[in-house]
């Protein structure tokens, strides 16, 4: 199966989801994809495709908020497992905490949230270090909004071009 047919199948599935659930479906898929820690479920392609079908601003906002809320699971894992993490990785956590106190953590969370970097790690670290949950959420939301708005507007302006470049249109 080639890339063009995979994209076409995903588009059909995503189109059905968007048709049935709209922005709520985008929010839910984004929340679930960010809440999964062990098995990553990327929602990038769905947000890109939905941006071509719906208002890209609302798509980006729905996906960004869903992703940011989903990232709180990583924070919860770090917060709940800090004793176990401290037993196994105490020296690393102590060095990380000193670095965070010296340089700050907000920009790191934004950077990881705004890129395909594994941002579950920042959530786990933030929870284990008792980083302020409000600051964590705002930083995660900032990055996730930037990423998902870029994806949605990319889909709005470039979806037809991507399909034609892959030979699907």
Image (cartoon, grey):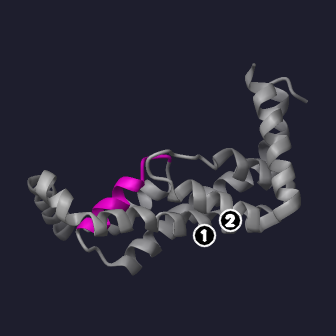
In the foreground, 70 or 117: 70
Q: Can residue 12 be seen?
A: yes
In the image, is residue 118 part of the stretch drawn in magenta?
yes
Residue occupying the point 71% across, 53% down? 47
In the image, is residue 122 part of the stretch drawn in magenta?
yes
- For residue 147, which quarter of the picture? bottom right
Residue occupying the point 82% across, 64% down? 22
| In contact (CB < 8 Å): disc 1 and disc 2 | yes
| Disc ID at residue 65 | 1
Q: Can residue 107 be seen?
A: no
Residue occupying the point 78% across, 48% down? 49
Q: Is residue 45 above or below residue 24?
A: above
Magenta stretch?
116-128
Residue 37 in the image, given as x and y percentages of width and height = 45, 52
Secondary structure mostly seen in magenta is: helix
- For residue 159, which quarter of the picture? top right
Q: How far separated are the C-alphas under marks 1 and 2?
A: 7 Å
Q: Quadrant of the N terminus?
A: top right
Quick one: label 2, few (<14), some, or many (20+) residues within 10 Å? Answer: many
**At numbered mark 1, what does the secondary structure look like: helix, strand or loop?**
helix
> Which is nearer the N-term, disc 1 or disc 2?
2
Residue occupying the point 61% across, 66% down? 66
| Disc ID at residue 105 | none
| Furthest-left residue in this view | 91
Residue 30 in the image, given as x and y percentages of width and height = 63, 59
| Disc ID at residue 27 | 2
Please state which of the two labelled residues, at mark 1 or mark 2, is closer to the viewer.
2
**At numbered mark 2, what does the secondary structure look like: helix, strand or loop?**
helix
In the foreground, 72 or 96: 72
Residue 68 in the image, given as x and y percentages of width and height = 53, 67
């Amino acid at each position: 199966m080639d890339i063009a047919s995979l994209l076409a199948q995903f588009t059909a599935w995503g189109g059905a989801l968007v048709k049935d659930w709209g922005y709520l479906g985008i929010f839910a898929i984004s929340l679930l994809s960010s809440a999964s820690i062990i098995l990553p479920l990327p929602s990038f392609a769905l947000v890109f495709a939905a941006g071509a079908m719906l208002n890209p601003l609302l798509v980006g906002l729905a996906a960004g908020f869903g992703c940011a809320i989903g990232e709180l699971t990583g924070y919860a894992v770090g917060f709940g497992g800090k004793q176990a993490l401290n037993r196994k990785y105490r020296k690393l956590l102590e060095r990380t905490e000193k670095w965070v106190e010296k340089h700050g953590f907000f920009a790191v969370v934004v950077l990881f949230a705004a890129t395909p970097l594994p941002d579950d790690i920042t959530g786990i670290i933030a929870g284990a270090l008792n980083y302020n949950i409000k600051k964590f959420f705002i930083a995660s939301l900032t990055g996730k909004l930037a990423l998902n708005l870029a994806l949605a507007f990319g889909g709005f302006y470039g979806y037809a071009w991507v399909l034609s470049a892959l030979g699907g249109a």
